[in-house]
Amino acid sequence: MSVCQLAAAGLPILDAGGVLKKRFSSPNAGLRSCVSCVGNSSRWRSLGAALPRRRLGFTKEKRLKTSVQASAEDENKNNDTSESKKEETSMNETHDPSVKSSSSEPSNLSTEQAAEDDKVSMGSPLPGVKSSSETARLPKEVIDTLRDQVFGFDTFFVTGQEPYEGGVLFKGNLRGEAGKSYTKLEKRLQEKFGGKYRLFLLSNPTDERPVAVIVPKESLEPGPGAVPEWAAAGAFGLVCIFTILLRNAPTLQLALLTNNADPTLISEGLLGGAITAGVLLAHEAGHLYAAKQVGAKLSVPYFIPSWQLGSFGAITRITNIIRNRSGLLRLAAAGPLAGAFFGLTIILIGLLLPPGEGQGIVVDAGAFHDSLLVGGLAKLILGDTLQEGAKVSVNPIVLSAWAGLLINAINSIPVGELDGGRVVQALWGRKAWSRLTGVSVGLLGLTGIFNDVSLYWVVLIVFLQRGPITPQSDELTSPDQTDLALGVAVLLLGLLVYLPYPLAFSYVLPPLA
């Protein structure tokens, strides 16, 4: 016996949990209440089949058993599962609104929201939002307003929707330029809801088609950390100061190995340490300047110590949402460009100035083969003084600035949340970023077999720099030509610093007989 027949007979209606919902006052009243159910049986059958199990709180088999018990004297035991689901949908339509539902979800949750509940966290195009268990779902009235009054034919024509981590993901067709459409949508969203919700125009990772995501603003706010950022960053910074000074004080390093360390020896590393730290500070200053220009907020920088170079640079998180990929690119490129400008300036000064009396450092000319950029500058300025197999005396500030330049270039590697990784994501999108991250980590792993610096950097990336990159509000608008040139310059500059100089320097000619 169907739920309509139960109502016509004046029998009580039970919900799926066995709770008494309503007894119709007359058989005719029950029949009238079920007309829409009978007239649209195919529609309710399809919606009932799409309902997730978690909404009713138990399995399909238990729902069938409860429905059979509700009408045991008349129900046919051979009713299939789809009939049971149709009856449940009818129950939800005909129960008294004054009686609370046994469902744990809000009563105004739309069927469309619940239909894809088990799939929304798979392949999510928007990283960094809280899980659906921590945030309330959008009310049906809000979703209807978004569909009918915010989106439209002139911006983004909605063809489907899915619940999405406390918000909703709209599928559809983007109309016109993404940037202009985003501006219109953002204005309408502000007019309807103020600053309560946040809009994202993104590329769906499954099919690369445009999607629009609406999430509550509070779901994007980061939670407090276990340790205050300034305390942890300060501890890392103090260790970095020591390692940078130690790296620029060779005598102190030798004394530590012989257990005859004199703390006063660290003074010999002050000048070189200041230059290396200056490159790092110029890098961070570039980020801060660009952040003000594009409206980005940055966390406290965490400087990572290194015994080989003094430091591996700083990890700085983006703590808010940047408007578009151009903003991300400018923010990411500003640091490496500022650090490179400062470091190259000091290297040029050091190569042009003669080593001071007793202050020059004698190095093998072959050391300049370690960098294509620095080796090329040295060959251009020193000329025939730079000969294979010969020793050359250089001002010590050259090596200190070179170390800072190498640290700056390492941050330009296109991987994870490094500046190079952010540049790649801003230039070519998340798919290119993901692929280049894998390639870069693989290449670093191979070079780590021969170079311990590369090995340590792989470990750092795996544990701290894997991403995902904080999303931008509009990830569909590509950067303009000027920003494209900036991004390519950052990637090329990094390559020029850490690729080797391939050409041979001049050879020392044997004396004439």
Image: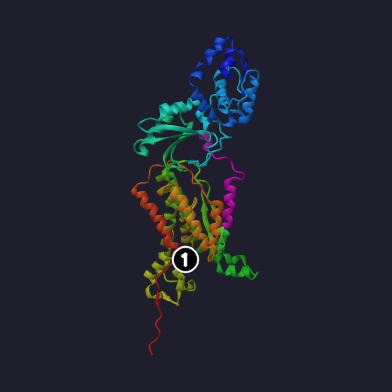
Q: Main secondary structure of the magenta part?
A: helix
Q: Position of residue 462 (x, y in %)?
A: 55, 53
The answer to if 330 sits in the magenta stretch is no
- Residue 18 visible? The answer is no
Describe the colour scheme in one phrase: rainbow
What residue is shown at x 40% (from left), y 86% (from top)?
511
Compared across the picture, whether 109 is left or right of 147 comes to right
Label 1: how many residues lie within 10 Å, few (<14), some (14-19) or many (20+)? many
Q: Position of residue 14 (x, y in %)?
A: 62, 19
The answer to if 232 sits in the magenta stretch is yes
Compared across the picture, whether 18 is left or right of 334 comes to right
Vertical placement of residue 298 versus 152, above or below: below
Vertical placement of residue 126 versus 22, above or below: below
Among the 4 quarters of the image, the one containing residue 10: top right
- Which residues lie in the magenta part? 215-240
Hey, what amino acid is under mark 1? Answer: Ile
What residue is shown at x 34% (from left), y 49% (from top)?
482
Out of 109 and 507, give the one closest to the viewer: 109
User: Which secondary structure lies at badge 1?
Assistant: helix
- Residue 10 visible? The answer is yes
Q: How many marks?
A: 1
Vertical placement of residue 165 versus 451, above or below: above
Residue picked out by circle 1: 397
Q: Position of residue 352 (x, y in %)?
A: 39, 68
Outermost residue toward the bottom in this view: 513
Quadrant placement of the C terminus: bottom left
Q: Position of residue 512 (x, y in %)?
A: 38, 88
